[in-house]
Image: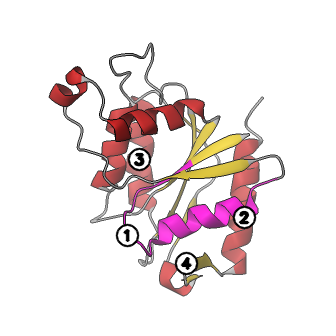
Amino acid sequence: MDILGISGSLRRASFNTSLLHAAQELAPAGTTIAIHDLHGLPLFDQDVEEQGDPALVVALKDAVARADALLLACPEYNGGITGVLKNAIDWVSRPGVARQAAPLAGKRVCIVGASPGITGTVRAQDQLRLVLRRAGAIVEPQGEVLVFQAHTKIADGRLADERTRELLARHLHNFLGTFP
């Protein structure tokens, strides 16, 4: 099983990117999680799209199309999903000039999220589910990974909290169990 991990944060010391690295460590045997970086991804613009997708967009669409599923690490900014993550979804929800179907259409998606706040990323994850469903993705209904007070659980880029590591490992296992 090949999973593509995408963090909705560009910050070098991102809690959400750290969650993806932990997921790589905790993934069940036979599962690989590759992380795709969103740095430099241009803002969605249909005029640009009609001229042909830029190279970074092509790379993202190809990575999403090749993956068996997506693992999205969703930060919460001002009570919602980040512009970075929404922009990436906007690009992969469209087929582009040379594609038959949008890479996100029918793709299974698992969501996790970390925030220094006390509610984790609950509002952002709810918004993300809505956007993903609208884009044709399959958002699995397994529980949520809402890492609250992430600054107390993630140190030096590593998810150190054992209880949260167990929750993330169980979440990944349950997600992979949804595949036929």
Of all residues shown, which one is farthest toward the top? 100
Inspect the magenta stretch and tell me whether residue 65 lies in it: no
Residue at 74% across, 62% down: 26
| Structural crowding at the residue carrying mark 1, measured as other residues with C-alpha within 10 Å and reported as few (<14), some (14–19) or many (≥20) | few
In terms of sequence position, does the residue under pointer 4 or pointer 1 come before the other?
Answer: 1
Magenta residues, as a range?
A: 5-28
Please determine whether, in this image, residue 148 is positioned above or below residue 35: below
In terms of sequence position, does the residue under pointer 2 or pointer 4 come before the other?
Answer: 2
Q: Quadrant of residue 156?
A: bottom right
Q: CA distance from mark 3 to mark 4?
A: 24 Å
Question: Could you tell me if residue 149 is visible in this image?
Answer: no
Verify CB contact (< 8 Å) between mark 3 and mark 1. no
Tell me which amino acid carries mark 2. Answer: Glu
Of all residues shown, which one is farthest toward the front? 55
Q: What number is the disc on residue 157?
A: 4
Q: What number is the disc on residue 128?
A: 3
Residue at 39% across, 56% down: 124
Quickly name the residue at label 2.
Answer: 25
Of all residues shown, which one is farthest toward the left? 47
